[in-house]
Amino acid sequence: DDGEAGERMTMQLADLLRMSLDGVGVQEVPLQQEMMFLQKYVDIQQTRFRDRLQVETAIDQGTLDTLVPNLILQPLVENAIRHGIGPRRAPGLIRISAWRDHDDVWMEIRDNGVGFARGRGSAPREGVGLRNTRGRLQQLYNEDHAMVLEDAPGGGCIVKIRVPYRTSNDKEEVTNAHVHSSVA
């Protein structure tokens, strides 16, 4: 019913589509680029949910050059909105964080939604999105990663992902070293 909001959302969707098409076939991107894409998605959801959705970020500036799987955070935020915030009448909060811990970078999506629907003592049920995320992490990093799902104290859920701290410079050095050793 809101023509101005509808027009704004159409433009936001066009930006989101353009960014996702630019990333087709790209396995890893700097966290800064991932956060720009995620912000476009969050803007759309905030237009949709208005006052019912608040999103906060706490991204350590020293992590922005870290290579992360392309489009790894958006499905997790989508899950937080769809399964955590959407079913509630009360406003919801999603907090997106990233920090460096020695040779690793942790990314966390935390919401204050309904939490995992599970019986006491059982593991959270993983849908297609979470299974796909786990599979992508395994494919890119073998065993050098982690993905942890847990109920948040006080309600909601937390998804944490750990990846090795690598930058595009590190990747180029490895590629160049391989090329030089092949030539020799």
Image: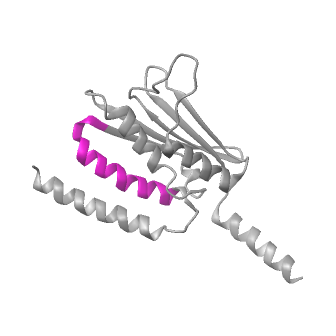
Residue 106, position in %: x, y?
A: 60, 43
Left or right: 111 as drawn, with respect to 135: left
Q: Position of residue 21 (x, y in %)?
A: 42, 69
Give the number of callouts: 0
Residue 165 is at least partly visible in this image: no
Picture layout, residue 77 above or below residue 20:
above
The residue closer to the viewer here, 68 or 78, is: 78
Identify the residue shown where x is 70% and y is 64%.
170
Could you tell me what secondary structure mostly forms the magenta stretch?
helix
Q: Is residue 144 left or right of residue 112?
A: right
Q: What residue range appears in magenta?
A: 32-53
Return the residue found at the far bottom. Answer: 183
Which percent across, then down, holds residue 95?
Answer: 43, 37
* Quadrant assignment for the C terminus: bottom right
User: Where 138 sits versus 146, above or below?
Assistant: below
Residue 112 seen by the camera = yes
Q: Is residue 14 above or below residue 45?
A: below
Observer-nearest of 59 and 139:
139
Residue visible at 60% across and 46% down in the picture: 134
Residue at 27%, 27% in the rendered image: 90
Q: Is residue 100 within the magenta segment?
A: no
Q: Quadrant of residue 8?
A: bottom left
Q: In percent of the image, x 23 and y 61: which residue is there?
A: 10
In the displayed structure, does residue 140 sit left or right of residue 118?
Answer: right
Q: Outermost residue toward the top?
A: 120
